[in-house]
Image (tube, rainbow, N blue to C red):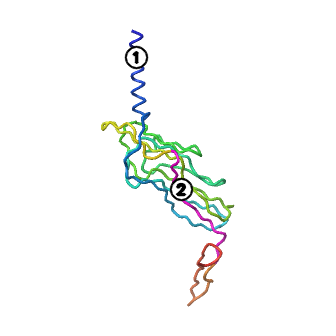
Amino acid sequence: MNKIKKLGIAVIALAMCLLLGVTVWAADSEVEFEATASDTDFCITGEEQTVTVIISASEAIGLFSLDADLIVPAGWSATVSSVDLPEDGFFYNGKNVIWIDSEAAGDVSAKDLFKIDVTIPASVTAGTYTVGVENLELTDLTINGKTYSELYWTEDATLSVEITVKAHAYPTTPEYKNDGETHTETFVCGNDAS
């Protein structure tokens, strides 16, 4: 009886490994992935500023899990949250973003996967900075249509945007009064008005 019990446990363990995607293959998919930012040009203002970067697919995809390493400049802070994915199963530890279908139902579909809210520190210096993810891995699990696991992207996959912080802001049009109304100044970042 013990041998039958052990054999049954081994068969169940093997089935679970297959179900959870031990066998992974590349998808024959035309889906593209991108990182988009709410803004990419900033001025040094002496105050903190925020930019939101959204990691998304070109179309809704079936998803079972995602795993990625965050790219955020030193001294900048970030929070990560789900967009189209259920919050259940979403984890962020300050460096890695992980999401797994907590119900293992294989029916989660999403286009905008998650967003990164990045705080640009008040003490930022002028320059170009990269924000995004690297080592992105996305898998799909199809249960009724079998598949079990389909790899969309992995290993060296990097999605990022370049954030430019310019040296200062200065007025391009001076304040003036016209017919008793005060007109405000227009500000432009950088070293010249171009």
When the figure is inspected, residue 58 is found, relative to residue 85, above or below; the finding is: below
Which residue is tagged 2? 160
As drawn, is 19 to the left or to the right of 94? Answer: left
In x, y percent, where is residue 4? 38, 13
Please give the name of the residue rendered at 66% of the width and 71% of the height, measured from the top-left corner: 168
Which residue is tagged 1? 7
Tell me which label, 1 or 2, sits earlier in the chain.
1
In x, y percent, where is residue 140? 40, 42
Q: Residues within 10 Å of mark 1 (few under 14, many from 20)?
A: few
Circle 2 sits in a helix, a strand or a loop, which is it? strand
In x, y percent, where is residue 43? 62, 68
As drawn, is 75 to the left or to the right of 115? Answer: right
Please give the name of the residue rendered at 42% of the width and 15% of the height, measured from the top-left corner: 6
User: What's the CA distance linking mark 1 and mark 2?
Assistant: 48 Å
Q: Amino acid at mark 1?
A: Leu
When the figure is inspected, residue 177 is found, relative to residue 155, above or below; the finding is: below
Please tell me which residue lies in front, 35 or 173. Answer: 35
Q: Amino acid at mark 2?
A: Ser
Query: Is the C terminus in the top left, top right, bottom left or bottom right quadrant?
Result: bottom right
Circle 1 sits in a helix, a strand or a loop, which is it? helix
Q: Give the extent of the magenta segment.
A: 155-170
Q: Residues within 10 Å of mark 2 (few under 14, many from 20)?
A: many
Please give the name of the residue rendered at 51% of the width and 45% of the height, measured from the top-left corner: 155
